[in-house]
Image: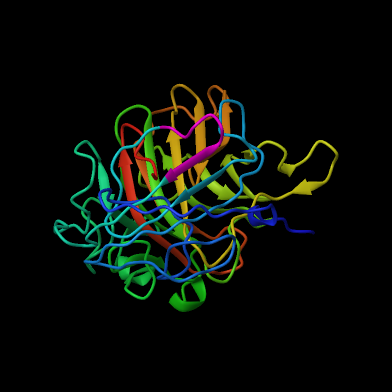
């Protein structure tokens, strides 16, 4: 199967400099930042340092109501996690710059002082203990979270560390489910997180789960998944929604929507179980607007938890990094 990546389209870089914001959305490579056009480049300012950068990533196949499929976003990041922001422009381009102080002022749970006041979960993973309010279950029972997770100071989007999901080959345990569950607001809610893989692009052909909105913190609870299944997609009980023009196409072929390895990607998702509309923004651009999804009655009940990590349903085994995870009633956004 031929594999397509987002950065196969033309990319451009717009330099942005700022010293007053706390975070910008960036597709920066491991532990670096500032300026990429589909390939790693150096220049990220770390904890307790000011800096700015720029990144451009062409989008493809936006859904109705989203940003332009040919749009791009740019931004620089250094410091703590983001607060609230506005929607991307109708022209499909958004820009931003940031400078911050990394982990300075972070509360004991590892979350930045920039967390929205109404957030139900917010963490930049700046301490080595399990984040406050996060639930870890192995074999449907509470377990030692360090079996499947570790705080990693060698790779981070902001501050000085991130959360790494260990690969199955590291743990020596056959279980596929390696997820943390955190509380979600009542009703519709938003999540924002940064994600990276170093060995594989995000968006493989087989079904695996990176994050989800679930009815409970139980491993087998019904959920709306942010997954890969012939590319990046929403998956609920094997009913899949892809970015427009991607996935299993009408012509009978496949066109996976994938995200390049070795760089951070900002994911924003609006989960609305009762209204049955799920929205996905990647690096500031809307890629999926799934209305009437999931189908009426297929996921009854209130979405109570947001989960993130890796549920390896078909493999292959891989490591996944997360940083700057926020769950809140309104959009947090990458600027």
Q: Residue at x 42, y 52 (%)?
A: 16
Q: Is residue 156 above or below residue 12?
A: below
Q: Residue at x 39, y 68 (%)?
A: 148
Can residue 221 be seen here? The reply is no
Q: In this view, does 159 lie above or below 89?
A: below
Give the quarter of the image for residue 139. Answer: bottom left
Task: Find residue 13 and report its horizontal and vertical position in percent.
Answer: 54, 55
Q: Which of 150 and 295 is in front in this view?
A: 150
Prevailing secondary structure of the magenta residues: loop
Q: What quarter of the picture does the C terminus occupy?
A: top left
Most extreme residue toward the right, as rendered? 251
Give the quarter of the image for residue 171. Answer: bottom left
Q: Which colour scheme is used?
A: rainbow
Q: What quarter of the picture does the N terminus occupy?
A: bottom right
Q: Which residue is drawn at 33% across and 32% down?
A: 330
Q: In this view, does 291 lie above or below 165?
A: above
Q: Which of 166 and 35 is in front in this view?
A: 35
Total marks in image: 0
The boundaries of the magenta stretch are 87-95
Q: Is residue 271 above or below residue 74?
A: above
Task: Find residue 67 and report its horizontal and vertical position in percent.
Answer: 56, 34
Task: Find residue 269 and report its horizontal and vertical position in percent.
Answer: 45, 39
Q: Does the magenta stretch include residue 18?
A: no
Task: Find residue 82 and report its horizontal and vertical position in percent.
Answer: 30, 47
Can residue 155 be seen here? The reply is yes
**Relative to 152, is 62 on the left or the right?**
right
**Relative to 180, is 276 on the left or the right?**
right
Q: Does the magenta stretch include residue 90?
A: yes
Q: Residue at x 51, y 62 (%)?
A: 176
């Amino acid at each position: 199967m031929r594999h397509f990546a987002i950065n196969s389209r033309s990319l451009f870089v717009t330099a942005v400099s700022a010293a007053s914001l706390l975070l910008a959305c960036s597709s920066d490579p491991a532990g670096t930042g500032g300026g990429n056009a589909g390939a790693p480049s150096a220049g990220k300012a770390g904890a307790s340092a000011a800096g700015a950068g720029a990144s451009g990533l062409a989008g493809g196949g936006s859904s109705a109501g989203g940003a332009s499929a040919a749009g791009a976003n740019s931004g620089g990041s250094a410091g703590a996690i983001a607060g609230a922001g506005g929607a991307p422009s109708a022209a499909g381009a958004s820009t931003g710059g940031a400078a911050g102080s990394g982990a300075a002022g972070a509360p004991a749970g590892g979350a930045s002082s920039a967390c929205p006041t109404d957030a139900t979960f917010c963490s930049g993973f700046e301490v080595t203990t399990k984040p406050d309010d996060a639930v870890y279950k192995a074999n449907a029972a509470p377990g030692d979270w360090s079996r499947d997770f570790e705080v990693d100071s060698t790779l981070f989007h902001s501050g000085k560390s991130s959360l790494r999901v260990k690969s199955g080959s590291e743990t020596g345990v056959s279980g596929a489910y390696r997820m943390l569950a955190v509380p979600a607001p009542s009703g519709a809610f938003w999540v924002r997180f940064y994600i990276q893989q170093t060995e594989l692009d995000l968006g493989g052909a087989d079904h695996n789960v990176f994050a989800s909105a679930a009815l409970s913190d139980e491993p087998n609870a019904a959920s709306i998944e942010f997954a890969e299944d012939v590319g990046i997609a929403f998956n609920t009980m094997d009913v899949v929604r892809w970015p427009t023009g991607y996935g299993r196409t009408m012509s009978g072929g496949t066109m996976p929507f994938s995200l390049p390895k070795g760089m951070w990607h900002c994911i924003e998702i609006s989960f609305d179980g009762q209204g049955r509309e799920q929205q996905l923004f990647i690096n500031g651009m809307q890629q999926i607007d799934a209305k009437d999804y999931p189908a009426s009655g297929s996921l009854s009940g209130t979405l109570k938890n947001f989960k993130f990590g890796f549920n390896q349903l078909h493999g292959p085994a891989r490591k996944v990094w997360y940083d700057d995870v926020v769950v809140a009633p309104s959009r947090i956004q990458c600027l």
